[in-house]
Amino acid sequence: MTRDFDATPAQLMRAHTDPEVFARWVGPDGMTTKILDWDATTGGRWRFVQTRDGMDFAFHGSFHEVAEDRIVQTFTFEGYPDSVALET
């Protein structure tokens, strides 16, 4: 998937590495996001829970590479723990 944004590369990196900024934009409309763990460094990890209508949906992963212009991470929806995506 490719997306175009009206933002600088630095703004895009911040949107993916700053947990407060990430929580404001991630996920479908109508969901609230609570960051439970966030270490946006190479070898770090992350976990968040999204809530809508009293239901929680949890996600987690690992940051395999965090560079100035690239992030490689895994993404797992805890409802399907055997399905792990590698994202770049």
Image: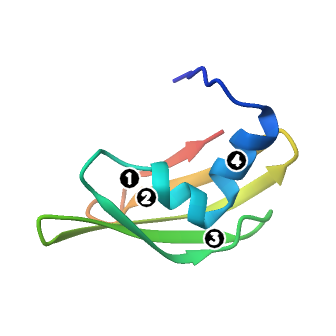
Label 4's element? strand
Cα distance between the residues tagged 1 and 3: 17 Å
Callout 2–callout 3 Cβ contact below 8 Å:
no
Q: In the rendered structure, are the residues bearing label 1 and label 2 in contact, judged by CB atoms less than 8 Å apart? A: yes
Residue that mark 4 sits on: 72
Assess whether mark 2 and mark 4 are in contact (beta carbons under 8 angstroms).
no
Q: Position of residue 67 (x, y in %)?
A: 86, 49
Numbered disc in front, either 1 or 2: 2
Q: Residue at x 80, y 62 (%)?
A: 42
Quadrant housing residue 8: top right
Give the class, few, some or many, for how many residues have Cα within 10 Å of label 3's Cα (few <14, many ≥20). some
Image mark for residue 32: none
Q: Where is residue 83 in the image (x, y as percent from the top left)?
A: 38, 53
Say which label, 1 or 4, has the lower sequence index: 4
Label 1: which residue? 83
- Which is more N-terminal, label 4 or label 3? 3
| Colour treatment of the image | rainbow
> Which quarter of the rendering shows the C terminus?
top right
Q: Nearer the viewer, mark 1 or mark 3?
A: 3
Spot occupied by residue 68 in the image (x, y as percentages of width and height): 88, 45
Left or right: residue 36 compared with residue 11: left
Q: Earlier in the sequence, mark 1 or mark 2?
A: 2
Disc marking residue 45: 3
Nearer the camera: disc 1 or disc 4 = 4
How far is mark 1 from mark 2, CA to CA? 6 Å
Which amino acid is tagged 3?
Arg
Q: Name the residue under label 2.
A: 76
State if disc 3 and disc 1 touch (CB < 8 Å).
no
Q: Give percent across and percent down for residue 39.
A: 69, 72
